[in-house]
Image: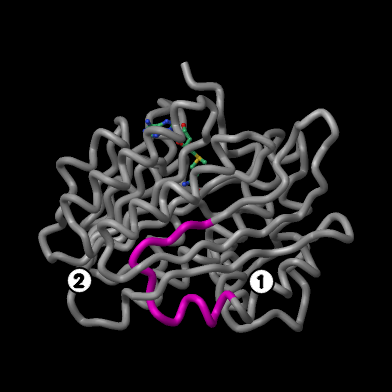
Amino acid sequence: MLAYRHAFHAGNHADVLKHLVLAQVLRRMGEKDKPYSYIDTHAGAGGYSLEGRYAHKRNEFEEGIARLWNRGDVPAALADYVALVRAFNGGEGLKQYPGSPAFAQMLLRPDDRLRLYELHPTDHRILQAYLGHHPNTQVAQGDGFAALKGELPPPSRRGVLLIDPSYELKTDYVKVLAAVREALTRFAECVILVWIPQLQLVESAQLPHRLQAAADAQAPRGWLHARLTVRQAHERGFGLLGSSMFVINPPWTLHDTLQQTLPYLVDVLGQYDGANFLLEQRAA
Ligand SMILES: C[S@@+](CC[C@H](N)C(=O)[O-])C[C@H]1O[C@@H](n2cnc3c(N)ncnc32)[C@H](O)[C@@H]1O
């Protein structure tokens, strides 16, 4: 049985970076008339209470979305992300946090397709109850890595793939790389977003380089890597220092958008003086 539950972490600094980038990518995808498929290999429960015992066990959202909630000076892309979280809360206070399927549900158009995979029985049940009845939406309890064979290429030949495992097991690093290579082999134009934890672990340090090599070999529109470091390294090697989003075939506007947004996130989400960001890309 899997132990990881995203409810403990919902709305933390890593979710802010991930969902900011996801929202920007889906906004750009929605600018062309042709429908697209959004495939979420590790979907989670879809939405999380910030008032329940899970969120309050570590209060991680207080060092993430809560720091942005009442600020009037946020850059445009971040303001758009916060507005989506507000919409999910019905315009009220910060009581719930949307997961990646909820961001997609808010941003996809009626003809776009949502394909959601979640292995944990409880989170799958919650996700199914939340989105299972929506048109053009499929919620499956299954292995998201294995599902790619059947999902790619998408019928409209336009697609976004989010790969967001918990990395609870080190084998996830290997599986992510294999999944990206397979996705690009099946559908080279796929826009692929991979979330990567920044840990004091060789696997997490190497994954961005391995993804770069895979994208250099197979992706026609290049790649972008955005990393936000908020915490100081612990002398015993514990803890999440920050996270990365690695985007393959990114929309061409994403680099400039993040260039304007990441310095602000360093200021607001940084937990020590050395908080920093990295933004690199190989454009097509
Ligand atoms: C980091 S969470 C996902 C968060 C979600 N993408 C979001 O942004 O709101 C990772 C999820 O993957 C699930 N999971 C783990 N292994 C899986 C697999 N092989 N296939 C599908 N889901 C898996 C876990 O149960 C967990 O809910």
Q: Write down the region rendered in magenta.
A: 245-258
| CB atoms of marks 2 and 1 within 8 Å | no
Write down the residue under mark 1: 262
Residue 93 as seen in the image, left or right of residue 168:
right
Residue 54 in which image quadrant: top right
* Nearer the observer, 41 or 53: 41
Q: Which residue is pictured at 44% across the width and 82% down the height?
A: 253
Q: Amino acid at mark 1?
A: Leu
For the C terminus, the image quarter is bottom left
Q: Secondary structure at mark 1?
A: helix
Q: Looking at the image, is mark 2 or mark 1 earlier in the sequence?
A: 2
Q: Residue furthest top?
A: 1
* Nearer the observer, 11 or 176: 176
Residue 87 as seen in the image, left or right of residue 212:
right
2 over 43 or under it: above or below: above
26 over 48 or under it: above or below: below
Q: Which residue is pictured at 49% across the width and 44% down the height?
A: 207
